[in-house]
Image (tube, rainbow, N blue to C red):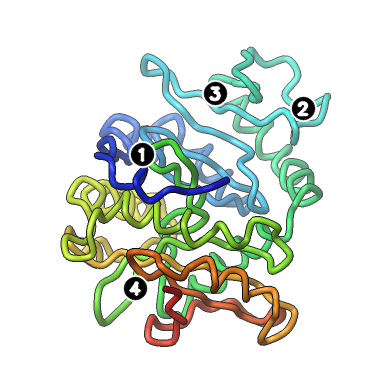
Amino acid sequence: MTWMRTNSLRAAPKFQRGLSDSSLRDVTSGACAPLIEACRAAGLDLRIRDNYLTAYAAGRAVALIKWNDGLATVELHHKFLRDEAFRGLTRFRRKDYWGYPVTPELVAQFEREAPHLFAAAQAQLSVEKRRETEILCDNSGVSHFVCLDRQLQMPTRSGRVDLVAVTKQGEKALALIEVRSEADSSLQHTPAQLLHYVETFAPSAQSGLREDVAASLVRVATQLRQLGCAAPEPGRIEPGMPVLGLVAVLCDKPESQRLAPLRAAAKGLARPVYLWSPASQGPLVIPPVAEWEALR
């Protein structure tokens, strides 16, 4: 795919993320609270969308928790469901998902089925998805960044950014991170793609993070913490903060010749994007911004 900078300069639709007040009450103290606890107990990674939640297992979206006319439902991806799972429960089909009303019976069956969902997702795990998950985990403790989101749909509907992270201390900054393998055939297109994402959230380097995006990300960080999930301090997110694009290329060697096309493709970009090429072995802790390689 060829990315044109002119596309990223068009006025982007308003960005909106976060649960409504009623949905938040439902997942913290209502009918959905046991389901949220079951997701967390199973090791699923919960991420907040526009008034619904996505649950990830091994980097794959296995479940969606939604509300339809006030009724809470969980939709489970058919790829990860066993034929015998959730039999006897009322269900409906929506694209690739089987949906079920959230009831005590559903939660009880979900608790039993969650290990199978996780194993099925693990079996279909790509290198990039595995590394994406490792970056999330490795930056949850002592690190320079904390991850806020994964597979975030851009408001222009032109793609998803792999990871969104926020600095823990020092200068406030938002990082949009694309995770790539050095063997990825589309690697040279990543800098322009990432710049498109950066310009969508921050139309100019001087203006920084858009106000509507900042407000939504603050809401998401606050609500994730209310759910007991790891998230940045909401005060670390504010309008006008720098938005930085980081390509994380996982290399078998410290300096791979396969990075040359990526560096060449980044020349002439209107704003820099950055490169981080950690070794394929060892913890994937995002380094401080001063240690990133500027591609421009």
Q: In this orientation, which residue lies closer to the viewer: 109 or 218?
A: 218
Q: How far apart in space, not on screen, are marks 1 and 4 (Cα)? A: 23 Å
Residue situated furthest front in the rendering: 268
Q: Dot 4 lies on which element?
A: strand
Residue identifier under label 3 = 103
Q: Write the residue at 46% across / 70% down.
A: 267
Q: How far apart in space, not on screen, are marks 1 and 2 (Cα)? A: 35 Å
Crowdedness of circle 2 by 10 Å Cα count: few (<14), some, many (20+)? few
Q: How far apart in space, not on screen, are marks 3 and 2 (Cα)? A: 15 Å
Residue type for callout 4: Thr
Q: Earlier in the sequence, mark 4 or mark 3?
A: 3
Crowdedness of circle 3 by 10 Å Cα count: few (<14), some, many (20+)? some
Residue type for callout 3: Thr
Q: Earlier in the sequence, mark 3 or mark 2?
A: 2
- Circles 1 and 4, Cβ within 8 Å, touching? The answer is no
Q: Write the residue at 43% across / 36% down.
A: 157
User: Where does residue 213 sit, x and y in percent of width and height?
Assistant: 26, 48
Residue identifier under label 4 = 167
Q: Earlier in the sequence, mark 1 or mark 3?
A: 3
Residue 155 is tagged as: 1
User: Where does residue 259 sit, x and y in percent of width and height?
Assistant: 63, 75
Discs 3/2, front: 2
Relative height, residue 37 to residue 65 (above, below): below
Relative height, residue 52 to residue 40 (above, below): above
Q: Dot 1 lies on which element?
A: loop
Residue type for callout 2: Ala
Residue identifier under label 2 = 85
Residue type for callout 1: Pro
Discs 4/2, front: 4
User: Where does residue 161 sit, x and y in percent of width and height?
Assistant: 48, 52
